[in-house]
Amino acid sequence: MPKLAVWKFASCDGCQLTFLDCEDELLAVAARVEIACFLEASSAPGPGPYDLSLVEGSITTPEDLERIRHVRRVSERLVTIGACATAGGIQALRDFADVKEFAAVVYARPDYIATLDRSTPIAAHVPVDFELRGCPPDRRQLLEVISAFLAGRRPEVPAHSVCVECKARGNACVMVAHGTPCLGPVTQAGCGALCPAFNRGCYGCFGPMESPNHASLNHWMRGLGMSTPELVRIYRTYHATTEPFRRAAEEAQRSGEEFGEEEE
Amino acid sequence: MFAGEGDAVDAVVIESLEPLVAGLRAEGYAVVGPVVRERVIRFEEVESADRLARGWTDVQEPGRYRLAEGDAEMVFSFAASPDSAKPYTQPPRQTLLRMRGEHIEEAGQDAPRVALLGLRACDLAAIAVQDRVFLGGRHPDPAYLRRRRALLLIAVNCAVPGGTCFCVSMHTGPKATTGFDLALTELAAPHRFVVETGGERGERIVAALPHRPATAGDLDAAAEVSRGAAERMGRHVDTEGIQERLSAHDSPRWAQVGARCLTCANCTMVCPTCFCSTVEDTTSFTDGTAERIERWDSCFTLGFSEVGGAPVRGSNAGRYRQWLTHKFSTWIDQFGMSGCVGCGRCITWCPVGIDVTEELANLP
């Protein structure tokens, strides 16, 4: 039976919980694979090597740098799950600031803290076979990826916009109908358009879609009343350092200067 | 074969929609009509005519839709809803095949009896376009045919066209002339509906309703509704020489619209004629089966034109040009009719307000 391992790096454990939340399918998964190493579910890890490793979390400590190389060595296939492992996560906001300053403000003894200046995705350090987006990933997509790897086929994880799923689900566009700013048009599908289905704009937690046009969207969202700091903030969340969203925030700053707005 | 292909009979007048809704439900139809949900006119199943969006209207412009209070008495005082008949003729997602081991079986596709109440002339024209696409070629789609036969089409002649409407330019409206089982024109003072039938099925339904013959006054008032609507189109397209104009593949205009286009695919999703789909194969953990699923796709996705691992139309401009050119020009070569019915949905529901009528007007 193929052996599965689940690993955690800098993260909130939400992606692993998504796996545990597959209540209806979990026993079926366990019948097809040996869940050999999964500390969130069992404190008795089995020995490697593993056929498939699911990796949650980003690389933020010197020890992580070593451990991810070990994980790669003992894994036939390595799939990252979630925004942290795939894009550095919310903790990548440190990339725009001085992490030593943060540590000095937060901790009584900052010298006890061993942390890197940046939060980086797993693929920045080791080869990754597939990156599953989302904060957290979608349960269906997680099962699809595991299922595809077991079957030796390409996972069906489209890279188009959230809008495609949103309209197929039967939602009306919240931006058009309510004037609610929404990152759906520049964000990759996968969540099933969860937030727009509840009349919220998309927060972009699945990261940039295949051909994001942030300049056009930013221009329109300014018309809906968003300021430059607000625009920068919505891109600097889960995928702050993923290239298209990094550029989207920079574009907002640049075009804000053209608009003659003052920075906060 | 379908509604609207029999001889017309004399119009009648009904005073309430309630007997119609109740009668259709008694015949086993799910009645789907316009209701207000989340500040948008949506098409949903209704159990009673009371549930319909009476008293509401809408304000539509490029990239903007707002619900507004209208004449409290009127039931249909709004323009196109984001919903067309498409989800009922071509569901967003359907299972085609199921496989277990070597055994493959076709999935039985539902063809529910649905009465669509409140379709507009543009929606009927869009259904005719889809009929041509799915039934007109050498390989008619049997599942489409089953769904299509199970649909009962009740049109409403537009009284209040939207700011993005241009059915007059596309010669599809505002008055429904064909393709319906019943066509209603809503009149005020006193509130009533003139009902035309488009075939035997419609006649049978009307015969079972409380009604009276339409007078010359009723018919004049109904004609005035359509005349007035035709004069209040929010948009216009000059279709003269449109195929020649769209052959301007090198126009700088494409790069300009490409810079605005989000390639989000909203226009194709809300378009009542866009029919492109893709298939996905999935495997299931729980029961050991595999499924082949057909779902809506769009020429704005990169996967749509992926050949040999790379997209043929990688640029935004290329994808926008493909869509607009197909819709207004090569569709005519392919199917003998335009792919656009002038409903204006792609203009209203484009998140950044790209206006096809403006793009067409600005081509050389």
Image (cartoon, helix red, strand yellow):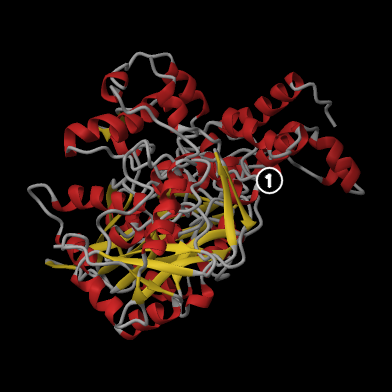
Instruction: Tell me if I can see residue A132 in this picture.
Output: no
At which x and y percent is residue B317? 41, 24
Relative horizontal placement of residue A43, taking residue B87 as reference (left or right): right
Q: Residue at x 66, y 57 (%)?
A: A12
* Element at label 1: helix
Q: Residue at x 34, y 81 (%)?
A: B209
Q: Residue at x 32, y 58 (%)?
A: A150
Q: Residues within 10 Å of mark 1 (few under 14, many from 20)?
A: many
Residue that carries the numbered disc 1 in the rendered image: A90
Image quadrant where residue B212 sits = bottom left
Q: Report the quarter where the N terminus of chain A lies.
A: bottom left
User: In the image shown, does A162 or A167 lie closer to the viewer?
Assistant: A167
Name the kind of residue labelled 1 in the image. Ile
User: In the image shown, does B52 or A253 lie closer to the viewer?
Assistant: B52
Image quadrant where residue B289 sits = bottom left
Relative horizontal placement of residue A165, taking residue A86 as reference (left or right): left
User: In the image shown, does B14 or B241 lie closer to the viewer?
Assistant: B14
User: In the image shown, does A69 or A159 lie closer to the viewer?
Assistant: A159
At which x and y percent is residue B343? 41, 45
